[in-house]
Image: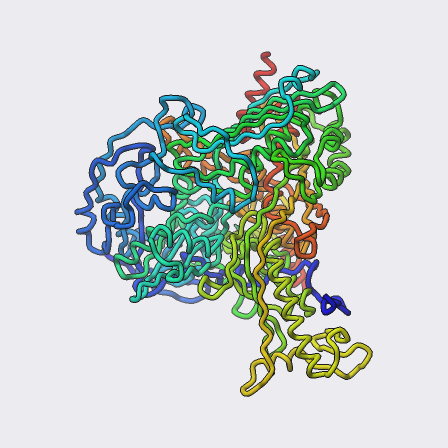
Amino acid sequence: MPKQILSFTVNGDKVDLLVPPYVTLLDALRDEAGLTGPKEGCGTGDCGACTVHLDGKPVASCLVLALQARGRSVRTIEGLGTATALHPLQDAFVRHGVPQCGFCIPGVLMAAAALLEEHAAPTEEQIRYGIAGNLCRCTGYTKMVAAITEAAGMIKKGAAR
Amino acid sequence: MSVMKTTRDVKGVGLSIPRPDGPDKVTGKVQYVADITPRGLLHAKLLRSPHAHAKIVRIDVSKARALPGVRAVLTAADIPELKGKPASRAHAVLAIDRVVFAGQPVAAVAADEVAIAEEALDLIDVQYEVLPASVDPLQAMKPGAPPVAELGTEADLSEAMAHSAVAMAKGETPTKAVNVSQTAHVKRGDVAKGFAESDVVLEHTYRVPMVHQGYIEPHAVLAEWDRSGNLTLWASTQGSFNTRSEVADVLGLEENRIKVIPVECGGGFGGKIRALCEPITAILARVTARPVRYVMTRREELEAGMPAPQVIIRLKTGVKKDGTLMALEGETVLESGAFSGTVLAVSAVFLGSLYKWPAFDIKGSEVLTHKPSVAAYRAPVAPQSIFAIDSQMDALARALNIDPVAFRARHLSKPGDPMANNQPWASMGAPEVLQKAGAHRVWKEREAWKKGAKPGTLRGVGLSLGGWLGGLQPTGASVKLNPDGTLSVLTGQVDIAGTNIALAQIAATAYGVDIDKVKITTGDTDVAPVTGLSAGSKTVYTVGVAVLQAAQAARKQTFEIAAAELEAAVDDLELVDGKIVVRGVPGKGVTLQSIGKKGNLYMSKVEPVIASSHPAFSQQAPAFASQIARIELDPDTGEVTLKDFVIVQDVGKAINPLAVEGQMQGGAVQSLGMALTEGLVYDDQGRLTNPSLLDYRKLTAADLPNLETVIVEVPSPAGPFGARGVGEPPIIPAPAAIANAIADATGVRLTEAPLTPERIALALARRGAG
Ligand code: FES
Ligand code: FES
């Protein structure tokens, strides 16, 4: 199948890629754009390791065809913080010792970031449902929930200032 | 050792310090095998058998070979190393003339792109002659069952050795049963007499299906050869030296020709110890003279990984009315899949040793079936064995109307008591853990809490206690002083659980500098001192000792250099804030920086400070955990909601409490998964019916409450700073804790995991009808 041009915005930058039409957004990001932060844990939409934002909404990028992202805006874990500063969620995850093997973490963080954009002060239940699509086998989720709660507070405080 | 005197507490052991790889992990910078793409990379795919048992009549790969972009298509006939019958799963690189489980690799492809490799698989034509399969382990033991093993294959005990050196008599007579690959038998006293004198005799059969370790990163490996015949493997492994040995064995290669680079491992839990896809990837790379990467799909992981064995345990126990234990009879069947390799002895030891049965008779069999062969899964066979014995203890206490904690405490073995294999229990904190759990609010307030149940719902509280004997393996570590006064620690230990920060903390405290002055590196097999598996809860317990000794030796070297320079006795020196000073003589001293610098200066006569240690071990440190579950249960649907969950665990000494808590919580959720939702389900043809994470249900954040951790510290005699293994104990107690909570809520005892709503509702309905 002939390759097609995919023009879209990735982490704020305009990007043109040449991709075959059957390629998923996950593979295009990883193999063509060199962004290996999003992970493949299942390829079937069940683990959340590949979660990225598409026009601000969290999606399982293994279920999205790359060409569906034409003209749209994608944000990956590489674009969550800045080159020099961690996003409050990332910072809280480090301090709470959340990452163990780390494989689920990029997906969990993108799901959590989307949650906080929707609910500035989520309840524990909202947090737990917000990351329910992300499987983690190492942490038991308790420290994740605590870190997300704390990050939400930090963001609010930052906004108030 | 006098130089061990510390005059000031350094920042090291005992502090909750986040692991140093955190920032790279939260930014997506950390590279796993699938993220590494060298120039000229080829992608591998394996064609797998759809049948559990079949003869391979013919394989035609000609069309696949002709596909543009395909660089190699291999069958067993193309690989000279694959001659005889495979002795183990690692040797079963590609099936030779018979497949023995659905998902067994039959042919391998390397191609320019994954999509091309997949297309090539479709073009391979295999003709099978399907044979009857042994699918159920109990049926497989019966005469006339379809045989699994090739004649002449031996029981594989390396798994047992790797995890927990359990000394035990092997079965006394070689068994005749066709698919029984290992037997074990332990007994003491007169069981028949014990049952005859018992007032209450309970018998249950407990069953836990095969479960998958569930690491989120599937198996992955990247292989490349140089022109001199040296192989480099970038592997997702729990033990790079073990991977090297196994691959060398399969390929008939000298070990020093293989370099294993342990890439960040996205979870293993026992499933990434034994070689699986490394040999075939190495062979494809050799044939194509290109780097080849193989990443398993989730479906392949579930269908053809190395899950935990199915465990079936029949337990019969007799007690007196006053709670006196009389006799225990047990029969354990471990389903090992197509190749032998379970830790049979662990089960018997736990069934017979945890409580003081005056008479017991426990027989164990490992049975082969036409399913993927199994491997370790965090405390292999312990959760299943504790599910049986702890459920049984709980049921006895309830039958006798005795407080379940008091009943356990009365009969619990203590250090020095004989285990089932007649070795004495080593120092362990089971009594302290049980006592702490029994005193916990969630347990103490259970009656009041149960009374608060909403109409139409039931409430229950369950507690259980389990443990792990602790693994051992020789290991090495080195510590060196850098020219700026910082320390570098080198091991070959793969860090999955946060062990590297704990090891660095041990080095900091043992040497006498703050943790921010210590950097630890996991080296590849060419440069690192030999190191064991990251498994069996033994990294901190054993590698910690090597690091401790190396740091102490480096400190001694440093002090000797300082003593010569200061013209003082070593005993008069102390290390304060990076400076070695003469006690009581302020101002007279030499900095670590200057000692480090002189060890690395052109024409300098001062030796560099480099110390290593390479201990072997003989003393295990058993570690115990108790878990308390508060549940709410809907009797109509059978649905269980976990309201509170407490983990009480003896860790000996928490080197890094933050990392310890993470281990306790993560292990508990795997334990709860085994209790509530997980199980590989096979049809009667031996095919997996739930090969996706949609159908193989793992617990999510929404299924769980916050998990409370209570750390108990009963120091081990031989561990660094008294530490014990931390990883395995938390995966052990939950199946029993949940079953006990369900029994508490409903009066019904469930014995088959996972304890799903269907099973619970059915059991309640059956009781209602009966
Ligand atoms: S890889 Fe996309 S959901 Fe698992
Ligand atoms: S940290 Fe390992 S899967 Fe989440």
Q: Which residue lies furthest to the top in this view?
A: B770
Residue drawn at (20%, 48%), measured in percent from left and top? B64
Residue situated in front as seen by the camera: B81 or B630:
B81
Image quarter hosting the N terminus of chain B: bottom right
- Tell me how the rendering is colored: rainbow
Q: Residue B315's spot in the image, x, y percent?
A: 59, 24
Which residue reaches farthest bottom? B603
- Which quarter of the rendering shows the C terminus of chain B? top right
Residue found 40% across the figure and 29% down from its top = B179
Q: From this viewpoint, which residue is outermost toward the front?
A: B172
- Horizontal side, residue B402 vs residue B263: left or right: right
Rendered location of residue B700, percent (x, y)? 55, 42
> Looking at the image, is B305 positioned above or below residue B659?
above
Q: Can I make out residue A80 in this image?
A: no
The answer to whether B559 appears left or right of A1 in the picture is right
Q: Where is residue B562 in the image (x, y as percent from the top left)?
A: 69, 79
Between B446 and B41, the one nearer to me in the picture: B41
Depth check: give the residue in front, B29 or B561: B561
Snapshot quadrant of residue A34: bottom left
Residue B579, visible in the rendered structure: yes
Q: Quadrant of residue B757?
A: top right
Report x, y in % for residue A3. Answer: 26, 58
Residue B528 is left or right of residue B143, and the answer is right
| Residue B45 vertical position relative to residue B768 in the rendered view, above or below | below
B660 or B191: nearer the eye? B191
Q: In which quarter of the image is residue A156?
A: bottom right
